[in-house]
Amino acid sequence: MPQEKFDVVIVGLGPVGATLAHLLGMAGVKTLVLDREGAQYHLPRAVHFDDEVMRVFQWVGIADELLPKLRVNAGMKFVGDDGQLLLDWPRPQEESTLGWNASWRMHQPDLEALLRTGLEARESVTVRTRCEAFNVDDRGDHVELRYEDMTKGEIHHIKASYVVGCDGARSLIRRYIESGMEDYGFHERWLVIDVLLKADKPELGDHTVQYCNPTQPMTYARGPKNRRRWEIKVAPDADSQKITTEAATWKLLEKWLRPDEAEIERTAVYVFHSLIAENWRKGRLLIAGDAAHQTPPFMGQGMCAGIRDAANLGWKLAQVIQGQASDGLLDSYQSERHPNAREFIETAVRLGGLINAADSERALRAAMTKPDGSAAMKSIYPALGAGLGPGAHAGQLFGQPRLQDGTRMDDVIGHRFVLVADADLVQDLRLRRDLAVVTTQDAPDAKAHLDSLGVLAVLLRPDRYILGTANTEQELTALIDQSDLTIR
């Protein structure tokens, strides 16, 4: 059997692997995706994503189809053991500066179905299910990978420029990288219960509720339509099999539901960890998603972090494969993404500790105090770590202006480099033809985005993080020239 050749092989077809495949496919990179399962997982896992992730789904072309399947998240309430409201975290119901609502609830199989269907239209992407990678050999100038087609029992040999492991917490590719794990100290068992209501039950509420109880903390979350979820901490000596029986599950839910009011879709015990791989790259092998980091669920950022990995890595791999950048560009992947992922994980660990605290009210107020003495919580948008671009604003996430006709900028620009600038600043400049340009004349609200940074121009990477900023023609010319050197 002849040896097939691909630019990139992705191991794993969950949301992270599928998103990365989309981004590479949009750039025309010849990509193979291998997944050991025969079909997508049909039960819910992740239930939340944020506005930055929705923007990525906008780039890959599934946002409009996804919208009817989602619910805008109302926010989160922290409630004491006696029912007292300790902290309210309302989520804005209007669009954020990124062009989408800040927080969304989803049914993961709906998302995966759209991602997989969309890949069928990517001519440069090949997807093979029931195919398990088992041997990876980095030869220096290429990677040789072997996998088994489990439907036929056949062994296949693949040659690739790069292999990316999006293959979860027990990642095969991470083993070949031989990475250790940084441990941030959170390791707890939690029972996850997903139910389908038989009729509306408004008294459950639309908010996510964190029940702060040091003995048995728990979380309630509303999903789209009739979906509801409870997550309940499991005692160290509890038997995982016994607590997942139907009788035990209904006993835990009796405060909120009767068996005639809902159907239990799934019960499962998870061990939540707080881990980050020490090495995300070794030669031509890379990892993303749960293979690179694992977080407690309290921020709803597990899948989100993986999608950010894909957005960061996708354009860089495409630049390298197409000869527009050196292999060294890939070194910035971990240096940028690691601190960003770490901040979400540390925040989630801190939240978990607050929910478990013996005096949750005092702990919440001590950790999240506003100047007036009350407790407050808000969304975080951590900057990237050291990597590409000069200046104080490099690595910050930039918003999404709307054009004159109301169209979101990314719907026109796509997933590529773009200059957002004051119209007067660029009117006399001759810019590179391959650089998309949006001015304050094209997008009236672009001025507000620029003013928030105190600059007249920003040069954005395809993942919409800032490469650099400028306030004069000379600074802008130097920025574009420097970025050309940086990228290449």
Image: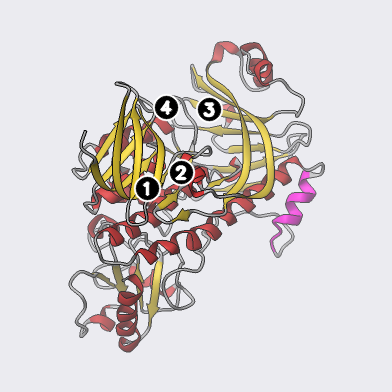
Q: Which of the two labelled residues, at mark 2 and mark 3, occupies the earlier sequence position?
A: 2
Q: Which mark is residue 86?
A: none
Amino acid marked by disc 1: Val
Residue at label 3? Answer: 228
**457 within the magenta span:** no
- Other-residue count near label 1 (Cα within 10 Å), few / some / many at <14 / 14–19 / ≥20: many
The reply to whether dot 1 and dot 2 touch (C-beta < 8 Å) is: yes
The correct choice, above or below, for 313 with respect to 467 in the image is above
Would residue 397 be visible to someone looking at this image? yes
Left or right: 60 as drawn, with respect to 71: left
Residue at image point 78% right, 37% down: 214
Quadrant into which the N terminus falls:
top left
Read off the magenta span.
Answer: 360-370
Q: Is residue 367 magenta?
A: yes
Where residue 203 appears, as percent x and y from the top left, is 59, 27
Q: Residue at x 28, y 50 (%)?
A: 24
Residue lying furthest bottom in this view?
474
Residue 481 in picture, x, y percent from top left: 30, 81
* Of marks 3 and 4, the one in the foreground: 4
> Distance between the Cα atoms at labels 2 and 4?
21 Å
Q: Which of marks 4 and 3 precedes in the sequence?
A: 4
Dot label at residue 41: 4
Where is residue 345 drawn, in percent x and y?
Answer: 60, 50
Task: Please name the residue that numbered disc 1 is placed on.
Answer: 163
